Image (tube, helix red, strand yellow):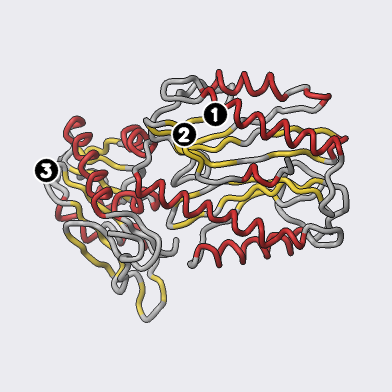
Amino acid sequence: MSGEETGGYGLQEAYCRARQEALREDLRDAGCAALLVRDRGHLTRLFNYRAREIFPAAGLILAYGPAVISRRVGDDGVVFADEERQFEAAYMASLRPGARDLAVEPLLDLIPDGSRLGSDGDLPLALAGRVEAVTMQPQIAQRQRTKDPDEIALIEAAAAGEAAFAAIEPLLVEGTREIDLFAAYQAAAVSAAGQPIGELGNDYRGGAGGGAPRTVALEAGDLIPIDTGVMLHGYYSDLCRTYPIGGEWSDAQLDAARRVVESHQLALSMIAPGVSCRAVYDEVSRFLDGYRGYSFKSHLGHGIGLNPVETPRINPHWDDRFRSGDVFTLEPGLYGPELRAGVRIENDYVLTGDGIRALSDSASVVPR
């Protein structure tokens, strides 16, 4: 089922069903009768459930039975389950307390007493003493890391936040308040998405490496790295472009920006399934850190998906290895006082058996 058929962006039924079935294999291996799903992201990935945070739901995947979802009365969003059950989340529009546990109540009769019950987090009090709880977080995380085509399509659609960069370029002049820049970006991102978006991070400060927007005005000659992630139907993109306030790059700023663009190509030339993330980081760090006295002390990138930062971590403190199906960012940068902050350029990519495909083109902001 396409996004248009589900009334907007969404996941596809065939992939949701396949993800449910993959976890059934894990449940059987663990000797569990079922998996109780309460995490919002997992409900999205497995059932296509999306609603405001104040409206929880619960899912149950039986190891040898159906996938059942419990959600509030009146919720008509498209979900993919073998059976739907409902609970009263509110009376006359007043929310009932403890709605997260209320969502589980319609599922209790499907959970055998004394069984091993897999979970993606804590269990409700109603199950205390009734079952043997088994965390399935490691298995879920392993399954979640490799993105299916419908998930990649959502992340790529979220990367349409690139359109918002173009919308704010006229505001990148002295005197514009950072908060007004943020507001314009958010409005443009919502318009491009065609629906409400989730939390919009991250960095909107002129003359600084990052930080939340303030009510202070931009100053000509400063650089401003705009690092932002649009969340669409539960899935995050993560992009950064750096602009000179007033539109004019100094020679030093432009040279640094071009070096950062080159570092993307260096990293991409190394990345393949099985390659050490630490090795990629080390090579790019040698290329950037110390260049003309500037520094590069941040991570190089990370996975994205249901969370803004996931595995793989391209960071010297871990030694993850790239896998086919990884969706990840690269965000190299150079920083120093002469640059009047620094240059960071972040792009989103997917690694497949056929190579790497860019989901965005944020490096295009730098003049050639």
Real-space Cα separation, disc 1 to disc 2, in angstroms: 8 Å
Quarter that holds the C terminus: top right
Real-space Cα separation, disc 2 to disc 3, in angstroms: 38 Å
Front-lying residue, 139 or 279: 279
Q: Please report contact status of discs 1 and 2: CB closer than 8 Å, yes or no.
A: yes
Quarter that holds the N terminus: bottom left
Amino acid type, residue under disc 3 in the picture = Tyr
Q: Please report contact status of discs 3 and 1: CB closer than 8 Å, yes or no.
A: no
Q: Residue at x 57, y 50 (%)?
A: 229
**Label 3 vs label 1, nearer the camera:** 1
Q: In this view, does 203 lie above or below 170?
A: above
Residue 161 x/y as whole percent: 57, 55
Residue behind mark 3: 64
Q: Which mark is residue 356?
A: 2
Q: Is residue 181 above or below residue 120?
A: below
Front-lying residue, 255 or 295: 255
Residue 194 x/y as whole percent: 49, 67
Q: Which residue is drawn at 88% across and 52% down?
A: 220
**Label 2 vs label 3, nearer the camera:** 2
Local SS, label 2: strand
Residue behind mark 1: 268
Q: Which mark is residue 164?
A: none
- Kindly give the residue lying farthest to the left in the view shown: 64
82 horizontally vs 3: left or right: left
Amino acid type, residue under disc 2 in the picture = Ile
